[in-house]
Image (cartoon, helix red, strand yellow):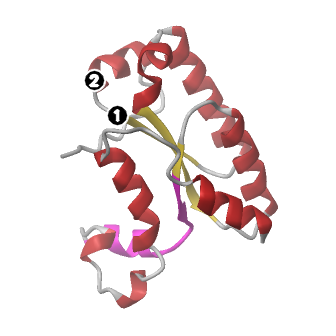
Amino acid sequence: MWQSTICRQLLAAKELIKVIGKHRLLIPVLPAPTDIKACVRFLMDINRCGFVERNSQQIGLFANRVNVRTNYFKVLLAFLNQVNLPLVGYLRDTQNYVRACSADLSLFDLPQRPVNHDLPQWQSILEWLESSEVEDLFKEEIAQIIKV
């Protein structure tokens, strides 16, 4: 069982570490310069508190709202590959999340046909959240995307 907690950006790293405890931390990163910089600052903050050193097995990253055909997706991947944390998946930029939210539903509650491309992208993320082994479950798929 896992729980999603959305934290405001200004939540101090020490406060967040208290909230997380021994649970996994899944960090979304958007393919935008400001978001990558914010991710760097956040990772530096939790590293300064010693959380990364003690819990690196419990921290995962995922690329959020990406279009794999853009150059900035490649920039984001280059950044994520430099960070010594597992890249556990990516979610494409789609209006299906907006539609689900406006109907007070999750993506998994929407009719199957409109979300056929989106649901499989959650597989590696959910596997990472539920697994006892921590590994970069997504590395092979990323390699295929980069080759295209």
Which residue is identified by label 2? Answer: 22
> Is residue 87 on the magenta stretch?
no
Q: What's the mark number on residue 77?
A: none
Residue depicted at x 78% and y 66%: 147
Q: Which residue in the rendered view is the most extreme toward the bottom? A: 113
Name the side, left or right, on which 118 lies relative to 71. Answer: left
Relative to 52, residue 24 above or below: below
Label 1 crowd (10 A; few <14 / some 14-19 / many >=20): some
For marks 1 and 2, give the CA distance.
7 Å
Q: Splitting the image into 4 quarters, where does residue 72 fall?
A: bottom right
* Residue depicted at x 54% and y 15%: 47
Helix, strand or loop at label 1? It is loop
Q: What residue type is disc 2 on?
A: Lys
Look at 54% across and 54% down and name the residue there: 138
Q: Is residue 92 part of the magenta span, yes or no? A: yes
The answer to whether residue 120 is left or right of residue 47 is left
Give percent across and percent down for residue 134. 42, 38
Find the magenta span and give its range: 89-103
Quadrant (top left/top right/bottom left/bottom right) for the C terminus: bottom right
Q: Residue furthest right?
A: 71
- In-front residue for pair 23/104: 23
Query: Of residues 136 and 105, which is closer to you in this image?
Result: 136
Residue occupying the point 65% across, 58% down? 142
- What residue would you read off at disc 1? 24
Residue 54, how many percent across, how many down?
43, 14
